[in-house]
Image (cartoon, rainbow, N blue to C red):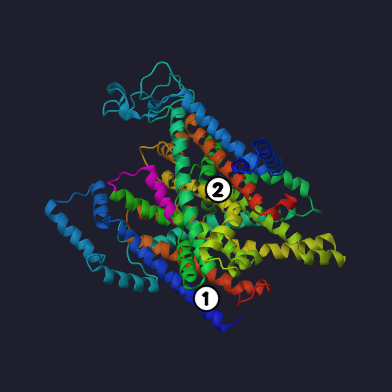
Amino acid sequence: MTVDYLARRIGMFVAVVFVATSLNFFMPRFTGQDPIATRLELLAAEGVTTRAEDYAALIETYNAKFGLDKPLVIQYLNYLSSAVRFDFGESITKYPTRVGELINQAMPWSIGLLVTSTLLAFVVGTLGGAVLAWQHGPKAAFELILPPFFLLAAVPYYLLGLILIWLLAFQAKILPLGGGYAPTTLPDWSDLGFLWEVFKHSLLPALSIVLASIGFWALGMRSMMITMQGEDYMLQAEAKGLTKTRAFLRYAVRNAVLPQTTALALTLPHVVSGAILVERIFGYPGVGRVLYEAITGFDYFVIQGVVYIIVLAIAFAMLVIDVIYPLLDPRISYSSS
Amino acid sequence: MATTASTEPLTPSSSAASDTLNQAAGLWRYMKRNPSIIAGFVLLAVIILFWGFGTLMTAPEDAKDLAFAPPNKRPSFENPHPCYSSENPRELCFAYDNEERPHLLGTDRLGKDILASFSQGIPQTVMIGLIAGSLGTIVGTLLAFVAGYYGGILDAAIRFIVDTLQTIPGILILIIITIAWREVGGGEMTFIQLALIIAMLAWLGPTRVVRSQVLVMKQRSYVEMARLSGMNGPEVILKEMMPNLMPFIVANFVLAVSSAILASIGLEALGLGDFSSNTLGMMIYHNIWYGSLVNGWWWWWSPPIVVIVILFIGLFMLSRGMDEWANPRLRRRF
């Protein structure tokens, strides 16, 4: 590994994060929406009435409070400094809750649900796809089981979610309709009964993600395995008299799993935001819902905070892959890129 | 493809006809070896037949909502659910009065005939996919050729923009742009505008994929040959590389249409669609909004889901089949 390559790659990382975070600052402002007016409308809807002469003063107070009265350049610089410090101040619509607090509350829900179900789908799908391409394995059984999953992979998560809600929650009444936990219970993470509640509530959204993505991983793995089987080293493994299982596991699967892992690393951060719709349909209290509420309420600081975390995660995952990949796969050299 | 033989001036017309026949037979023989393409076409044909059936059996005004209902059927403060009765199962409400046409799939809470909604909504959704998909493919392919063929600073710039934009989750950018656009239009947005918004990001994927193919193809001997024999850049791209990459680009176009439709349904389901349209995504939105699942109105929520699933699976099979056609190495063991 050359220092030059590493320096160039880290420079790229910084540049990507910088441009993406800048877009993140300017895009919500291009909407021309007034977050303060939105907040006041919300207050009005809650029954807080304001006299006309107070209204202007109120808007001024809020604008000063959130620094929205300053020139755009100053706001931008403030924003950059807050991004470096990981402190995005207070939410506008949920004042005085801090943005960090909102994200911290939602993150465990999202990571618990999405990462678990994505990993589960990845493992099952990759194994299934590998066996499907292996001529000496229990291929026939998998040829019956997997094709329906290929078709499910073409269906959006949330539609599958709707069908599952109807089947398992509405008709069979085995699982709850939505939410993170039953509205009648208090969140208490040391209580086993509460944990069971949380588990039951996460089953339906998790199931819709797993069912819809197994096929995606299986298809990727299968075509990768087919490419591997044409390689010379597979012929060599056979010529050396290795057992079929050993050639399959150590030669074909070992090589085919590399691009799969890359795809997984790139998918994981997207999962957080990609599940906006799943979280909305199931009323699940994760980051996707925080983001959706922030966007519809024009809560600049929350949007900035959430998007910044996601951008950082994706850019970092790409950096790690680019740096580690040549170590995992000697065929790829640092100089070629 | 089959008509090229008949436009050849030197070929006698009788053999032109048999040429066409031969080509058609060859195409058919190939299709038989590629069941994915057939399955894709069949599923899309099912959608077209369903649309045709709906168009024959209903009139456009059957898809009008309650705003067009006679005053006694319109919801008011005294009578919020004017046509809600348990007498007619599968008919929640109907805005437009007619005696001669039965509601084959029932009616919804908005006062629309469900079959009539489909005969309007299917072309609208397909239109969104075609507009965004073709704009994305055309712009993406152009950028990919410029970046891949010429390289240098242009390539670096295009790659940087694509990498950066792909780092931010696409649906998020689309949500923000859509909200901004609606604000500019005074809260109104047509489904064509939605398609244009989706097209703003639809070029990212094609640019990335086609560029890597261009890089590989640039090394081929026939491209070098063309360059050495004095062809300039645009000539090499148009005459040598484009025809060879066409199958690949077409296969990618199907994928682009499919992901544009996916994005549009996602935005619409979140409530960011064209409320005057009947697109498949708006049907999903209204179903979520009125809670048709928990109300047991299965005849309302199930048809859009079935149509969307058939549409996506059809496009998916088609793109897989075309991938195989574009990249014969995949054919071996399928």
Is B191 included in the stretch rendered in magenta?
A: yes
- Looking at the rendered image, the quarter that the C terminus of chain A falls into is bottom right
- Residue at screen point 22% across, 49% down: A48
Q: Secondary structure at mark 1?
A: helix
Q: Amino acid at mark 2?
A: Val
Q: Quadrant of residue A114?
A: bottom right
Q: Quadrant of residue B29?
A: top right
Relative to A91, B141 lies left or right: right
CA distance separating discs 1 and 2 = 34 Å
Q: Secondary structure at mark 2?
A: helix
Q: Amino acid at mark 1?
A: Arg
Q: Image height check: is B284 above or below A21?
A: above
Q: Nearer the viewer, residue B12 or A332?
A: B12
**Residue A188 shows in this picture:** no
Relative to A214, B179 lies left or right: left
Residue range in magenta is B185-200
Percent coordinates x, y for residue B107 in the rendering: 43, 26
Percent coordinates x, y for residue A319 in the rendering: 53, 71
Q: What is the chain letter for disc 2?
A: B
Q: Nearer the viewer, residue A64 or B34?
A: B34
Type of secondary structure dominating the magenta stretch: helix
Residue pointed to by mark 1 = A9
- Residue at screen point 39% across, 43% down: B191
Comparing labels 1 and 2, the label whose residue is closer to the camera? 2
Q: Which mark is residue A61?
A: none
Is A230 included in the stretch rendered in magenta?
A: no
Farthest-out residue, top: B99
Residue pointed to by mark 2 = B254
Percent coordinates x, y for residue A286 in the rendering: 46, 55
Q: Cβ–Cβ below 8 Å for labels 1 and 2?
A: no
